[in-house]
Image: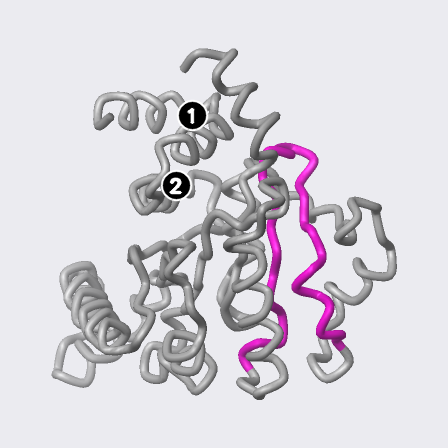
Amino acid sequence: MDPARVKEHFDRIGCFRVLVMGRSNAGKTTILQRVCNTTDLPEVFNSEGEKSELLLRDINCTNHSQRGYHNIEAELIFKSNRAFIFHDSRGFEAGSEDEMEVVRNFVADRATTIKLEKRIHAIWFCIPMTDYERAILAAEEKFFKECDTRNVPVIVVLTKTDSLESVAIGQLIDEGSSMREAKLKVRDREKKLLIYHETRIINELKGFKYPPKGYLTLGNMNKDNADCNPLLRCTTNALDSIELQQLLISTQQTNLVLNIECVIEK
């Protein structure tokens, strides 16, 4: 990619900005760390770009009832890759009308604002497969029914898919397999379980007023060889603007595989 064009995009648009949504156990932080190639926690800034220890304490608070609704405005930036700015809608899983209103207003404002450097370019909505039986709760249903996301692509990320391994083993043993036999058959059963639940979730989300634009599954993101390319590739394909596609690709200049793939596709 022409470095001059990359710089032009960054100067005009700013960083690639993502709203990350999902439950507190969805593995969101681990995914963001993988995308930015780090194990460090992000720095937290307020909407004016000022580093804030108060927001950092609020973001790290484990008690949802003590979190302020302003958290979604906080900007999370990793030192390893400052080309990304993340927003996290913490506490949203409670599904209250006040929390929904905060998210709805944030998306409405940030998806269309004339201030390009403040505009969000994508939403990553994480749903953990540890909760596969109750994947779509009231909060998810309310978001996809009520939050107008026509101006920003939503990517649903089914996370922690590796958790289905224990489910698969349990099923096989219940069906009469020994532990040794179950371990030999587990990969095939795990794959079938993932396909079944992924299809079920996609079909349910497609029935809502504002369905996602893309879907993918991610597992074992806590391992050293974890691959976040599918998420970046899916997001790139969901973007309508070639300019934004180039901006996202440029954040991964060291990722030769992704760069080559995107160049060939375009």
The count of marks equals 2
Write down the region rendered in magenta: 67-93
- Closest to the observer, 214 or 173: 214
Q: Is residue 80 left or right of residue 169?
A: right
Residue 80 in magenta? yes
Residue topped by disc 2: 232
The local crowd at label 2, few if under 14, some if 14 to 19, many if 20 or more residues have their Cα within 10 Å, is some
Residue topped by disc 1: 255
Amino acid on which disc 2 is placed = Leu
Q: Residue at x 75, y 46 (%)?
A: 43
Amino acid on which disc 1 is placed = Asn
Please provide percent x and percent y for residue 132: 33, 77
Furthest-front residue in view? Answer: 114
Q: Is residue 142 left or right of residue 68?
A: left
Q: Is residue 222 left or right of residue 129?
A: right
Tag 1–tag 2 contact (CB < 8 Å):
yes
Picture quadrant of residue 138:
bottom left
SS for dot 2: helix
Q: Mark 1, mark 2: which one is toward the viewer?
A: 2
- Closest to the observer, 253 or 10: 10
Instruction: Find the distance from the CA under tag 1 to the CA under tag 2.
Output: 11 Å
Q: Is residue 52 visible?
A: yes
SS for dot 1: loop
Return the disc, 1 or 2, that comes first in the chain's sequence: 2
Q: Is residue 157 visible?
A: no
Vertical relation: 142 (above or below) 90: below
Q: Residue at x 43, y 82 (%)?
A: 142
Vertical relation: 249 (above or below) 174: above
In the rendered structure, find residue 246 and report the number of the disc placed on it: none
Vertical relation: 126 (above or below) 77: below
The local crowd at label 1, few if under 14, some if 14 to 19, many if 20 or more residues have their Cα within 10 Å, is few
